[in-house]
Amino acid sequence: MTKQNSGIRRRLSALVAVPLAGALSLSACSTSGDAGGDSGSGDKQGFSFLFPTSTTTESPYEALAKKYTAETGVAIDARKLPNDSYGTSLRTQLQGGNAADLMVVAPGRGQDYAVLPLAEAGLLEPLSAGSTAVVPDAYKALLEQDGKTYAQPTDIVPVGIVWNSGAATEAGAQFPADATAMLSLCQDLTGKGKSLVALAGSAPPNVGLMAMSLSASRVYAQTPDWNQQRADGKVSFAQDAGWKDVVATIEQMNKGGCFQKGAAGGGFDAITQGLARGTSLSAFAPGGSATEIMNNAEGVTLEIRAFPPAAGGKQYLLASPNYAMSINAKADAEQKKAAQTFLEWLAKPENAAEFTKIEGQVPISGVEGAELAPQYATVKDLLAGGDYAPLPNLSWPNPSVYDQLSKGLQGLIAGRGDAASVLAAVDKAWDSK
């Protein structure tokens, strides 16, 4: 059914972790790309562009840079960094005054390359009105500081669960409507030598992504401003019924055979092999990964689904601009101008649409009238109806909150610790600043 080779597995292993804390195994160092040669060559001012990417496939950012250079003649010095050290390296370069002119950042402040802390430190340049116009009202708080826009989003990344509909049909399974049906399906699949979910239990970002996917319907559907309430001290992870249900459901899934055997020690290969072979029907991964998986695994048909809610609950999805672009405040004036011109070019509908197509994501605005990729047909109504929340950790106060959640759940899946201690540790990380 599939082209199962090591190259595909490496590519897919990278993709399933892309939008989160950066657990990829990517290229070893920054390299000058082939998108346009040296910055500033020729009679048009060029600039440098830094982004996280994999050496195994051409990054969408590289493709974007090549298109811009082909159309305008402006050279772009494309630089790559491995995702697992991207944030640390970016901050070091910015503080050292040797960062690229343009760079990829994360919205909000919950990751180590998040835009708002970098803007507060004076490391980023405010963007033009053309960039500000691209930011939907719902995401302004993730990209703006003191009324100024510091990052331009490129698209929306739906996050729920990737469902292998072809393998499900072969197994006689239908996507479960709620948690009760899900646990029943897990038992049925176990009897057939399959699992509902392929989990990379040894990788904190994949475990954390699972928790956040569950929180969509159990926390943020009922309380969209939960993060603000937590910041105001009105709620806590340890006392919240929704977050308790998130952890309890994961424990039920673990005990109920929803994960593949050996899930606690599983790596990203467990996901790629499980989906490619059809031994697992789903995995927690960003929407764009479905596009790449289908492009590289012949015969595999994937859909993006909202994770089944609790019985009586409503379907709810996570979707947000998980990446954006910012300009280095310490860059030379001509490079800043060139980078801003690039961002304004990218903001044009035809260029934004092409980049969205390359990435396999959803347009940053106008989703109700957009022609989405087939894998999003199952969530288009949720997106058009606004039944989604941003990825929660984008507005968490520091990366340790997400780390504690992920590592605590890893322990539970491996048989260590208890739910109350996990959530208490997450609260402590939140309050630690």
Image: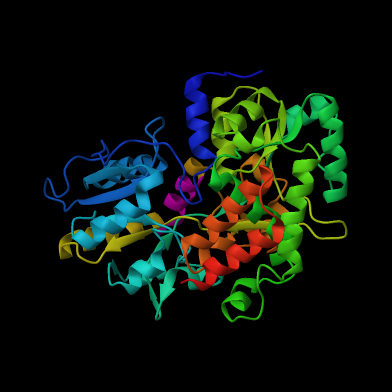
* Vertical comparison of 142 with 213: above or below: below
Asked whether 36 falls inside the magenta stretch, the response is no
In the rendering, at what x and y percent does residue 180 appear? 87, 48
In-image side of 330 versus 327 (left or right): left
In the rendering, at what x and y percent does residue 280 appear? 71, 30
Asked whether 351 falls inside the magenta stretch, the response is yes
Magenta stretch: dominant SS?
A: helix
Q: Which residues are magenta?
A: 347-356
Judge whether residue 96 can be spotted in this image: yes
In the rendering, at what x and y percent does residue 408 appear? 61, 53
Nearer the observer, 373 or 199: 199
* Vertical comparison of 149 with 350: above or below: below
In the rendering, at what x and y percent does residue 38 appear? 16, 43
In-image side of 352 versus 385 (left or right): left
Q: Residue at (61%, 40%) from the top-left corner?
A: 201
Nearer the observer, 429 or 34: 429
Nearer the observer, 4 or 333: 4
Question: In this figure, which colouring scheme has been used for the structure?
Answer: rainbow
Q: Residue at (55%, 46%) from the top-left corner?
A: 204
In-image side of 93 versus 160 (left or right): left
Q: Residue at (48%, 51%) from the top-left corner?
A: 21
